[in-house]
Image: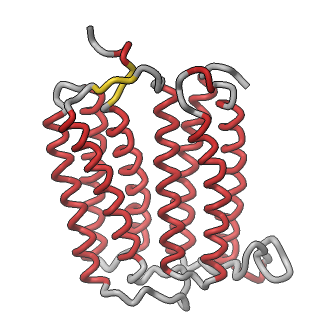
Amino acid sequence: MPAEVTRWTRAIAWINLALQTLIVGTGGAVRLTGSGLGCPTWPRCTDESYVVTPEMGIHGFIEFGNRLLTFVLVAGAILLFLAVVRTAGSGRGLVLPALLIAFGIPAQAVIGGISVLTQLNPYVVGLHFVVSIGLVALSTLLVWRVHHPVAERADVVPAATRATAWAVAVLALVTIVVGIVTTGSGPHAGDSGAARNGLNPELLQHVHSWPAYAMFGLSLVLLVLSRRAPLVRRYALLLLAAEVLQIAVGITQARSGLPAGLVAAHMLLACLITAAATAVVLATRQPARALPR
């Protein structure tokens, strides 16, 4: 347990971020293959067994595989906490986000279990995704801090630019939440018998696009405002690239009947946008010693 950040600390932080994104992908696979009730109860897979049985077929193996990945995340979170627990005096602020991630993973598992016990209630499933997005943002924060100390930070852009960065991040969250509600009205319930939220999916697709386009427009403004802040501009460009891809995927999936592959890509791009938007906000403040004299 090092007292300073090492290359292994940075590697573990990056692995944690990758795992938080990966479980969104595997969770999407569970839902998009109709395997949400492949294990029909929780915490056991069946009333008699904690593990999947051959009689449950491919859906059971897909759902159980996603459950097993939670243990990989827990192991990663433990390693992450051990890697940063003695760095409290380094000025990097790593211990609290590592703790939140460590507690967030079992909380996420419990919410997933509740979603199974409620027969994939769309609002519980939506909360499951919201927590995943929160863990991606926290993991991005931790990755940032293992590379950039928290102590002695200073604004590197004007207040208007910083406010624009925060507005982009808020719009990203709003877009994702409305997208979750939209998904809850659509065809991908995770199981053929699962209920939907009863809202109009065509109307919600349009409502979902409004904050998305507003976020894209503000991201363009941010790119212009950050022309003298190279680090902010770099992540603003990454965010814009992810947004362009996301818009293209969103329009295509809406016009082609929501094919599973495009919906999965849409979910993973939401994670990338979350990470990039978080990085943009963080980049508006940098260690004072790194500023040009």
Which is nearer the eye, 151 or 283? 151
**Residue lying farthest right?**
48
Q: Is residue 153 above or below residue 19?
A: above
**Is residue 48 toward the left or the right of residue 17 in the image?**
right
Give how far across and how far down residue 232 sits, in percent. Answer: 28, 32
Give how far across and how far down residue 76 sits, in percent. Answer: 67, 43
Rendered-image quadrant of the C terminus: top left
What residue is drawn where x is 37% and y is 35%?
282
Which coloring applies here?
Answer: secondary structure
Which is nearer the eye, 197 or 14? 197
Q: In this view, does 199 lie above or below 61?
A: below
Q: Can residue 178 be seen in this view?
A: yes
Q: Can residue 69 be seen in this view?
A: no
Give how far across and how far down residue 157 sits, in percent. Answer: 23, 29
Which is nearer the eye, 153 or 236? 153
**Is residue 215 toward the left or the right of residue 25 in the image?**
left
What residue is drawn where x is 47% and y is 39%?
141
How many dots with numbers? Answer: 0
What residue is drawn where x is 30% and y is 87%?
200
**Is residue 129 toward the left or the right of residue 214 in the image?**
right
Q: Is residue 176 above or below residue 53?
A: above
Give how far across and how far down residue 35 sits, in percent. Answer: 60, 77
**Is residue 136 toward the left or the right of residue 207 in the image?**
right
Q: Is residue 79 above or below residue 119?
A: above
Rendered-image quadrant of the N terminus: top right
What residue is drawn where x is 38% and y is 13%?
289
